[in-house]
Image: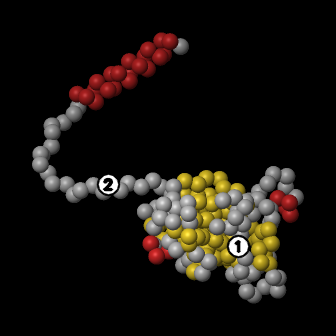
Amino acid sequence: MSDENVLISEIIDNSFDDIASEIGPTGPQNYNCPPCPNNYSFPTFVNAYSTCEQKIEKGGFIVFDNTNSVFGNCLHNPNTSEIFIWRPGYYSVYTSIFHMEACQFSLLKNSHFIAPVSTVGSFFGSSQNTNYFIIQLEESDMITPAPFSNTGYACKLQIVNNTKASFMSYVTLIGSFSSGNQLPQITASITIQSIV
């Protein structure tokens, strides 16, 4: 075993020696490069999900009982429907909803505005609705008071039940209890990630 380690280390040392001998000449001096931005920012992402079966009233919100990961300029508290983001930019959004009845759901910004291309639905029950889209959050979206934000404001995001044409007053999110499976399974999830 020790002979193998010696040989590997010799190979590594020799490979660095070969690289050092292949360094080319120095390039032109005093080249005027554009200035580099000094405002590097860390990525922002959140993944929230629910394993609880829920009855979502018309106009009601999906509650995410767990947060798998949260990083950067965002926040989700478990057992709430709200996700807060306080950095303007472009974000990719993925939603997945497992439901029993025909339905329609949308991503709602600040309790009033449906995010473009976020609405998804199904004419039939016992289905899965997924959607992947990109939204832009602007400075003007940062209007919800948020003491945890560095500016004191954030954009609040929620998934709302928009179902209008159903005889039911609610939509049931189904999981392992209804399907008879032993392991908890996702009833709804959302992933939001900054891309610019």
Amino acid type, residue under disc 1 in the picture: Phe
Seen in the image, is 67 located left or right of residue 11?
A: right
Q: Can the viewer see residue 78 in this picture?
A: yes
Q: Position of residue 65 (x, y in %)?
A: 73, 60
Q: Which residue is mark 1?
A: 61
- In the rendered view, how is the structure colored? secondary structure
Name the one closer to the observer, 150 or 50: 150
Q: Quadrant of residue 10?
A: top left
On residue 38, the disc is 2
How many numbered discs sit on the rendered protein?
2
Q: In the figure, 101 relative to 186: above or below?
A: below
Q: Can the viewer see residue 125 in this picture?
A: no
Q: Position of residue 57 (x, y in %)?
A: 77, 78
Q: Secondary structure at mark 1?
A: loop
Q: Residue at x 68, y 67 (%)?
A: 81
Q: Quadrant of the C terminus?
A: bottom left
On residue 48, the disc is none
Q: Position of residue 121 (x, y in %)?
A: 68, 78
Q: In the figure, 171 relative to 10: above or below?
A: below
Callout 2 crowding tier (Cα within 10 Å): few <14, some 14–19, many ≥20: few
Q: Secondary structure at mark 2?
A: loop
Q: Residue at x 55, y 60 (%)?
A: 148
Q: Residue at x 68, y 76 (%)?
A: 160
Q: Position of residue 84 (x, y in %)?
A: 58, 65
